[in-house]
Structure formats: C-alpha cells, structure tokens
Amino acid sequence: MVQRPIMSDLLLSSIFTAFTMVRLLKGPWLRNPQYLATGILGAIVAVLLLHGLWPAYDDDFVIGGVTGIFGSWAGMALFDAILGVA
C-alpha cells in the first residue's frame, strides 16, 4: 500500500511559501501584515481548489509549489486591485 501525503502537508508548504512570497514581493512581514494575511489566504484557497479539482496532484512536488506561489501572489494582487494600489 502506497502512503500518500495528507492535505496538511500541502497546506503547510503553501503557507510557508506565502511567507517567502510576501518577503520577496512586498518587503518585511511586520511592515506589511495585510499582505501576509492575503498571501496566506490566497495560498490556502489555491491549495483547496487544487485538491478539489485535481486531487491526484496533491503529492506532486512541483505542482504543489507552483500552487503555493501562484495562490499567494493572486491573493496579494487581488488585495491590491480591491484597494486600487496596483
């Protein structure tokens, strides 16, 4: 029987990826907590969408990483668009 990673592994990876994306794109976390929150939320939504639409890709290293990166970026971009900053 093959052990598949559980959903929490992918969620934790995406949350840590959101920390990195905020640091790279927006600067320090303590100066931009709103971007950290939207980045984490975007990464979680992206992972949940991935799990809902293509559950077979949950254990793929590259797809999981790209999902975390794209999700956190999309969350921050949506936040900027709503505020009219972008």
Image: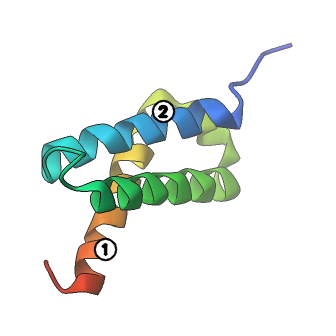
Q: Which mark is residue 52?
A: none
Residue drawn at the location 34% of the way across and 46% of the way down: 69
Confirm or deny contact between disc 2 and disc 1 (CB under 8 A). no
Q: Please identify the quadrant where the N terminus is shown.
A: top right
Q: Is residue 85 above or below residue 25?
A: below
| Whether residue 63 can be seen here | no
| Residue reaching furthest to the right | 1
The mark total stands at 2
38 or 49: nearer the viewer: 38
User: What residue is at 67 percent from the left and 40 percent from the top?
Assistant: 56
* Residue in the foreground of this view, choosing between 62 and 70: 70
Please tell me which residue lies in front, 13 or 2.
13
Pointer 2: residues within 10 angstroms few (<14), some, or many (20+)?
some
| Rendered image quadrant of residue 83 | bottom left
Numbered mark located on residue 79 in the image: 1
Secondary structure under tag 1 reads helix
Considering only vertical position in the picture, is 54 above or below 14?
Answer: below
Residue 85 placement, left or right of 38: left
**Residue 2 figure quarter:** top right
Q: Is residue 67 above or below residue 49?
A: above
Amino acid type for the residue under numbered disc 1: Phe
Q: Which residue is mark 2?
A: 13
Disc 1 packing (10 Å; few <14; some 14–19; many ≥20): some
Identity of the amino acid at label 2? Answer: Ser
For the residues labelled 2 and 1, the Cα–Cα distance comes to 22 Å
Indicate the secondary structure of the residue bearing disc 2.
helix
Point out residue 25 in the picture as x, y percentages from the top left corner.
15, 51
Disc with the residue nearer the chain's start (2 vs 1)? 2
Residue at left offset 13%, top offset 47%: 27
Q: Is residue 9 visible?
A: yes
